[in-house]
Image (tube, rainbow, N blue to C red):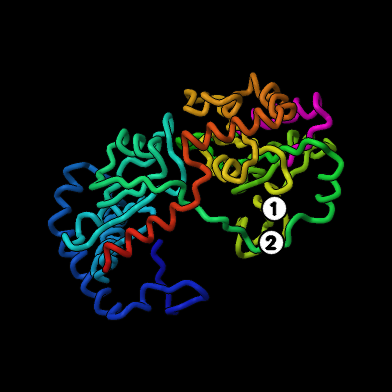
């Protein structure tokens, strides 16, 4: 992401004005932005776009030009922002754009559709096929494996009260919530979230030896009705882990002192993800933690090919019971098969990308 500031450096962050000739580049980029506007306005008006789009055009054109005029040999990152499309327009032939997906995207997830890059570093064939199906403008595709690192937030681990609760149950389910939005087109809204939690509540009554740790991600608890929240809080085998609300900062999961997702994952037996396409599923499987992807509204994905990796509301209890009682042989077979198909346990994706980019710039 682009970051401008009066500072040049703040901790590990280098702002754009810290680069050589940044002032000159800023002025020339601004000049060319308005010069391009003179020619592009007719296309904007011809397309009958709202006038407010002109503002976004100016901002993103300026960002793209600034980046290109820094004269990097390779532009590397998850190039899915608006200005990244314009980078492809303004870059020179000698400059290479190299991108990767920060998660495994697959059908029926529509995913982003406007990606332009000279090189796309794909996780596996599933990722490659999905990029092609979404008509990404890619020069070449290189499959490198999962691109992740064992990144952990600065945390003090599990809180003492939660450690005590964990010790009382023999099957711990980490329920990972996902971003919820109302009044706009999005995969998860309040009704979908509350229906999911109602099912968790029902199952918690049937299986009182199962512990359900419900982890907030981006303010999902604000969408839960007072009545449902009250009923969840009453249950001894349901624990709600909220994000710390910090004055003048707002919601920032990384600033919580205890009980981060990674802390909870280490101590849980299974992850149940509200979002079937969430990266937490792969984060869990990579650590050989069992997972269930909840999907109660969309077509089934390739996850259906594995026993109860994908589950809807109707068979969620069966899925939990299956993994609770699965033998070590069944679990090992599952991880072996998922690794064959997805390459989930290969750790060299980041190294392969960096090595390839070094070859480009040398």
Residue in the picture at 36% in, 35% down: 130
Above/below status of 297 relative to 102: above
Highlighted range, magenta: 192-213
- In the picture, the disc for residue 155 is 2
SS at circle 2: loop
Q: Residues within 10 Å of mark 2 (few under 14, many from 20)?
A: some
Q: Are marks 1 and 2 in contact (CB under 8 Å)?
A: yes
From the image, tell me which residue sits under label 1: 263
Disc with the residue nearer the chain's start (1 vs 2): 2
Residue in the picture at 71% in, 28% down: 327
Residue in the picture at 18% in, 59% down: 37
Q: Quadrant of the C terminus?
A: bottom left
x, y percent for residue 266: 70, 49
Q: Main secondary structure of the magenta part?
A: helix
Total numbered badges shown on the rendered structure: 2
Specify the farthest residue to the top. Answer: 314
């Amino acid at each position: 992401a682009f970051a401008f500031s009066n500072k040049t450096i703040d901790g590990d962050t280098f702002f754009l004005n810290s680069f050589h000739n940044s002032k000159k580049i800023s002025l020339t980029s601004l000049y060319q932005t308005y010069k391009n506007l003179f020619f592009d306005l007719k296309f904007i008006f011809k397309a009958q776009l709202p006038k407010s789009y002109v503002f976004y055009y100016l901002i993103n054109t300026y960002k793209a030009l600034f980046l290109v005029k820094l004269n990097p040999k390779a532009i590397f990152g998850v190039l899915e922002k608006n200005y990244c499309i314009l980078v492809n327009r303004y870059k020179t032939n000698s400059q290479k754009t190299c991108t990767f997906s920060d998660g495994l995207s697959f059908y029926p997830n529509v995913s982003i559709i406007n990606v332009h890059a000279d090189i796309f570093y794909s996780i596996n064939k599933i990722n490659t096929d999905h990029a092609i199906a979404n008509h990404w403008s890619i020069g070449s595709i290189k499959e490198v494996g999962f691109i992740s690192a064992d990144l952990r937030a600065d945390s003090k681990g599990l809180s003492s009260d939660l450690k005590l609760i964990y010790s009382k149950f023999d099957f711990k389910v980490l329920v990972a919530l996902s971003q919820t939005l109302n009044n706009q087109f999005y995969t998860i809204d309040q009704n979908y979230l509350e229906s999911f939690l109602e099912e968790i509540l029902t199952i918690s009554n049937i299986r009182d030896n199962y512990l359900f740790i419900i982890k907030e991600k981006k303010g999902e608890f604000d969408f839960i009705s007072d009545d449902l929240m009250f009923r969840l809080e009453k249950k001894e085998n349901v624990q709600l882990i909220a994000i710390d609300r910090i004055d003048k900062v707002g919601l920032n999961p990384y600033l919580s002192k205890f009980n981060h997702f990674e802390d909870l994952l280490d101590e849980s037996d299974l992850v149940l993800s509200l979002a079937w396409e969430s990266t937490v599923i792969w984060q869990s499987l990579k650590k050989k933690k069992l997972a269930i992807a909840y999907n109660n509204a969309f077509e089934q994905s390739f996850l259906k090919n594995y026993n109860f990796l994908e589950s809807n509301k109707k068979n969620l209890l069966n899925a939990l019971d299956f993994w609770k009682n699965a033998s070590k042989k069944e679990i090992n077979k599952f991880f072996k098969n998922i690794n064959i198909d997805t390459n989930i346990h290969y750790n060299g994706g980041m190294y392969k990308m960096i090595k390839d980019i070094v070859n480009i710039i040398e």
